[in-house]
Image: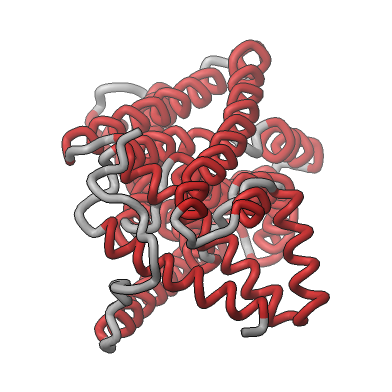
């Protein structure tokens, strides 16, 4: 098996440590500050619009109803992310981007597209709404949601390991988008009576809670495949554009079926099998990641960085849970935190190694590998109390 030009380090000597200067902290502070400003502006504008259009009482009730699907959707994507958990701050960023920035941008651009069609006299208002739903909405909304994944990929390009990362971030941004969009639809339905509210809640929150997350998951898959397998910029772009095209098509079919009054047959004949297919794919992705962790960490065990019993523990969710309980019983919360960090770092190391093998890891892979090995050694010492 190819090793991408170098073998795993066989000893702790000569490790390249992380940048010790304040520049990384400064960059992180600037990024966090920029994100906070953007979210505050987008959130303020979105709240102003919802309050003006619906009234604050309606917004509060609609938000409570729209939050219910989140207790189903978000845990599914977090379950998928168990072997190498993404940092919470990036998951929150993805959710807030979908809930605030993507919804606000979609509201402005879709409304503008509809207005242009109507004012141009090309078509009547009802037909213009269909065009907006089938053409504008999929392109605009999937572009805005995809931009969150792309931002995270650029900021975390060394830690963005592949398809699961792309799917998890896509699920979070899609969940945020669906949450705020459902507030708007449910709020509008409340003006039409209780029966309409029940119908909209059933349609959007019970029948279609995974719609937006799964549409955007196609883009996440494309970006993840590009990271894991493409060796050139053009190859990465090709995978990303392919995934985005699938996301737009899935979104367009969903909206078209509702616009043409064939939603129910399309839902059961197309959307339900698609959803089941995604669930099967998620399970296969989890199994594949476990297999990759076991395969590539074995190389580090052969080189002396890990024991083979540690590799067996790291390759399975059950043994990982047992190890966390053991660490907590032996050293309390600090030891458990060190064990969790050890497990996440080991997974990141294995996935980096898999990208080295495929030739898609990039020129900084060896330095990143050294940093992960340094962290791994320190984390093991922490939970062992050394």
Tell which of 11 and 223 is nearer to you. 11
Tell which of 317 and 50 is nearer to you. 317
Residue placed furthest toward the bottom: 22
Q: Could you tell me residue 340's position as x and y percent?
A: 63, 67
Instruction: Identify the residue at image location x=74%, y=52%.
Output: 319
Along the horizontal axis of the image, is 125 left or right of 26? Answer: right
Q: Could you tell me residue 374's position as x and y percent?
A: 42, 72
Along the horizontal axis of the image, is 92 left or right of 287? Answer: left
Number of marks in picture? 0
Q: Could you tell me residue 260's position as x and y percent?
A: 53, 15
Tell which of 238 and 250 is nearer to you. 238
Instruction: Report which quarter residue 290 is drawn in.
Output: top right
Quadrant placement of the C terminus: bottom right
Q: Could you tell me residue 117's position as x and y percent?
A: 28, 31
Q: Is residue 114 visible?
A: no
Tell which of 163 and 246 is nearer to you. 163
Q: Is residue 298 visible?
A: yes
Vertical placement of 71 versus 126: above or below? below
Vertical placement of 369 versus 175: above or below? below
Instruction: Identify the residue at image location x=62%, y=47%.
Output: 315
Vertical placement of 203 versus 366: above or below? above
Vertical placement of 28 versus 122: above or below? below
Instruction: Identify the residue at image location x=24%, y=31%.
Output: 238
Along the horizontal axis of the image, is 145 left or right of 171? Answer: left
């Amino acid at each position: 098996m190819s090793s991408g030009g170098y073998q795993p380090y066989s000893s702790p000597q000569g490790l390249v440590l992380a940048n010790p200067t304040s520049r990384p902290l400064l960059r992180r502070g600037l990024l966090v500050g920029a994100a906070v400003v953007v979210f505050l502006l987008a959130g303020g504008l979105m709240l102003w619009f919802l309050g003006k259009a619906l009234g604050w009482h309606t917004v509060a009730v609609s938000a409570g109803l729209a939050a219910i699907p989140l207790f189903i959707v978000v845990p599914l994507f977090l379950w998928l992310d168990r072997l190498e958990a993404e940092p919470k701050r990036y998951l929150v960023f993805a959710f807030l981007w979908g809930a605030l920035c993507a919804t606000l941008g979609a509201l402005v651009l879709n409304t503008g597209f509809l207005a242009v069609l109507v004012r141009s006299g090309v078509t009547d208002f009802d037909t213009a709404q269909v065009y907006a739903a089938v053409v504008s909405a999929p392109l605009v909304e999937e572009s805005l949601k995809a931009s969150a994944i792309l931002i995270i990929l650029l900021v975390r390009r060394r830690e963005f390991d592949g398809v699961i990362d792309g799917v998890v971030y896509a699920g979070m941004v899609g969940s945020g988008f669906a949450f705020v969009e459902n507030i708007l639809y449910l709020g509008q339905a409340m003006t039409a009576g209780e029966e309409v509210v029940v119908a909209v809640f059933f349609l959007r929150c019970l029948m279609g809670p995974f719609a937006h997350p799964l549409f955007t998951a196609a883009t996440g898959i494309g970006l993840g495949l590009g990271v894991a397998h493409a060796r050139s910029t053009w190859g990465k772009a090709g995978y990303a554009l392919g995934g985005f095209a699938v996301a737009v098509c899935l979104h367009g079919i969903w909206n078209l079926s509702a616009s043409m009054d064939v939603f129910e047959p399309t839902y059961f004949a197309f959307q339900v099998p698609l959803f089941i297919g995604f669930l099967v794919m998620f399970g296969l992705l989890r199994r594949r990641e476990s297999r990759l962790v076991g395969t590539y960490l074995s190389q580090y065990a052969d080189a002396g960085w890990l024991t083979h019993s540690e590799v067996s523990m790291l390759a399975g969710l059950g043994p990982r849970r047992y190890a966390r309980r053991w660490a907590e019983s032996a050293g309390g919360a600090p030891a458990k935190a060190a064990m969790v960090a050890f497990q996440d770092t080991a997974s990141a190391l294995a996935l980096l190694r898999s990208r080295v093998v495929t030739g898609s890891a990039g020129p900084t892979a060896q330095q990143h590998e050294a940093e992960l090995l340094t962290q791994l050694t320190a984390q093991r010492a922490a939970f062992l109390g050394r």
